[in-house]
Image (cartoon, rainbow, N blue to C red):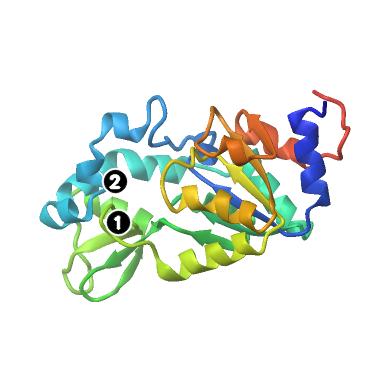
Amino acid sequence: MTEPLDLARRLVAAAARITAFTGAGISAESGIPTYRGAGGLWREYDPAKFADIEYFREDPSYYWRFFRDVRYRAIADARPNAGHLALAELERRGKLQAVVTQNIDGLHQAAGSRRVYELHGNTRFIDCLDCGATYDFAAIHEQVRTELPPRCRACGGRLKPRVVFFGEALPERALRAAEAVVASCDLLLVVGSTLQVHPAAALPPMAKQIGARIVIVNVGPTAMDHLADAFLDGPAGTILPRLLEPPGASPR
């Protein structure tokens, strides 16, 4: 019987139009905490407050304290890990057509991936809800040290990170592009997502329906393991570089 790793290598080697779908797990090795796992953000901070758009409108200070004390440092210190770099290498080789991600950290772009669709936005950009001015998150971090909530320097308006809060719709352009690259792939490579919520939960069935193969890389089981041609249990930074090796490569 073919081992899952070697089967996954064979699927990657045979594929010509890979679409990668990534969740928080791929960035955990870069020091960014996940949401649902042990020690995840939702165990320490109430998502009904820091991630809900209605609560943000009522009391933006709660989110900005979270940004100042947790989010900024995690993002500022994070660097792409071997998993991000492996996906960028697959793109460089002409095999990976796009990365669809739930992550908001910008690490895929930092690793060199060029075609990235961010379903939940990017926390590195801050927008004024009133005049539309845009700021880099590092500049806003300096402001939130002394002022909560921070205000737009141009108009004094409300500032919000360019991320999707609970109660907000996903960005239509990114969502449609994500659906298109999944619908056209011959291999869906899922990395670091439990595939429990939509749109993540909808992507493997969509890929399966068009006859694409599915490889899942995650620490622990996911909700869609039954659809996978190969499931690899482990960290992305360890497993993804091994998928670049030729089938039959010796184990390490």
What is the quadrant of the N terminus in the image? top right
Which residue is more in the foreground, 55 or 112?
Answer: 55
Residue 145: tell me if it is visible.
Answer: no
Q: Residue at x 54, y 27 (%)?
A: 220
Amino acid type for the residue under numbered disc 1: Ile
Rendered view: 200 above or below 37 = below
Which residue is more in the foreground, 32 or 3?
Answer: 3
Position in image of residue 9 (x %, y %): 79, 40
**Residue linked to disc 1:** 140
The numbered mark at residue 122 is: none
Q: Are marks 2 and 1 in contact (CB under 8 Å)?
A: yes
Amino acid type for the residue under numbered disc 2: Phe
Q: Residue at x 80, y 23 (%)?
A: 252
Residue 142 lies left or right of residue 177; in this view the side is left
Q: Residue at x 37, y 31 (%)?
A: 40
Write down the quadrant of residue 121 in the picture. Answer: bottom left
**Residue linked to disc 2:** 67
Residue 97 lies left or right of residue 172; in this view the side is right
Which residue is most to the left?
58
Position in image of residue 178 (x %, y %): 54, 62
Position in image of residue 137 (x %, y %): 36, 56
Residue 66 lies left or right of residue 241; in this view the side is left
Query: Earlier along the polypeptide chain: callout 2 or callout 1?
Result: 2
Rendered view: 249 above or below 15 = above
Q: Secondary structure at mark 1?
A: helix
Q: Residues within 10 Å of mark 1 (few under 14, many from 20)?
A: many
Rendered view: 177 above or below 76 = below
Residue 17: tell me if it is visible.
Answer: yes
Which residue is more in the foreground, 238 or 9?
Answer: 9
Position in image of residue 156 (x %, y %): 16, 69
Q: Residues within 10 Å of mark 2 (few under 14, many from 20)?
A: many
Which residue is most to the bottom?
131
